[in-house]
Amino acid sequence: MTTGHLIVFEGLDGSGKSTQVELLATALRVVGFEVVETAEPTRGEWGHRIRTMARGGEPVPPQKELRWFMADRREHIDHLIVPAMETGCVVLSDRYYLSTVAYQGARGLDWREILETSEREFLVPDLVLLLDIDPSDGLLRVKQRGGIAEPAFEDASFLDGVAAIYASIDRPYIEHIDARDDSDTVAARVRDAVSRRIGGPL
């Protein structure tokens, strides 16, 4: 039986997920929580295939891409998320199954079916913090930070479709966070949402 919490950050590239994971982890540790930070795709075999494809490797059909993400997530849950939660940790994940819903949905797959399948098979998060940002602003941030390009997922029209699916997902565990402001302002919104969901001031 798990006794910890799973909190997931979702949103477009450039929305600030990685930064907000780090800031929330620090805030949680200050008040005494044990925290594990993680991300998808993972650094495992399936995650490596996904990253290689995203960074300009040979493209794969959407259904095959979906299978890779699902396989990576199964390993992630079994090897890291559940064991950490069983020891009482708060697990903070940069992306989880809603990324697959939105991104593979924008590839043309049935995003509602992916969502329903994911909720049946995978651990449902205690909280998803969906960082909302305009796709063009997200792409600009990605360019400005000089990170590794992922052309498979950084097309403007494609990201418009991703954003539309994210906006259409209606689940009680999702909190929308306005991510257009500076990181400290966004972090305050994140802490408020987490405090309301898991209790205690942050």
Image: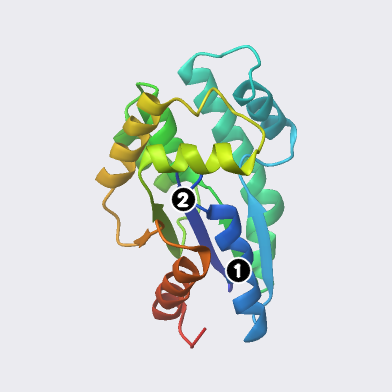
Q: Residues within 10 Å of mark 1 (few under 14, many from 20)?
A: some
Q: Quadrant of residue 56?
A: top right
Label 1 to label 2, Cα distance in Å?
A: 15 Å
Secondary element under disc 2, as helix, strand or loop, is: strand
According to the picture, the residue beneath numbered tag 1 turns out to be 23
Residue 73 appears left or right of 126: right
Is residue 13 visible in the rendered image? The answer is no
- Image position of 64 with respect to 112: above or below: above
Residue 141 appears left or right of 79: left
Q: Position of residue 127 (x, y in %)?
A: 43, 64
Residue at 69% in and 54% down: 80
- Image position of 70 with respect to 201: above or below: above
Residue at 74% in and 31% down: 45
Secondary element under disc 1, as helix, strand or loop, is: helix
Q: Earlier in the sequence, mark 1 or mark 2?
A: 2
Residue 71 appears left or right of 103: right
* Numbered label attached to residue 8: none
Is residue 148 visible in the rendered image? The answer is yes
Of residues 190 and 90, the one drawn nearer to the viewer in this rendering: 190
- Which label lies toward us, 1 or 2? 1
Q: Position of residue 23 (x, y in %)?
A: 60, 68
Residue at 64% in and 57% down: 81
Q: Quadrant of residue 84?
A: bottom right
- Image position of 28 with respect to 161: above or below: below
Identify the amino acid type marked 2. Answer: Glu
Identify the amino acid type marked 1. Answer: Leu
According to the picture, the residue beneath numbered tag 2 turns out to be 10
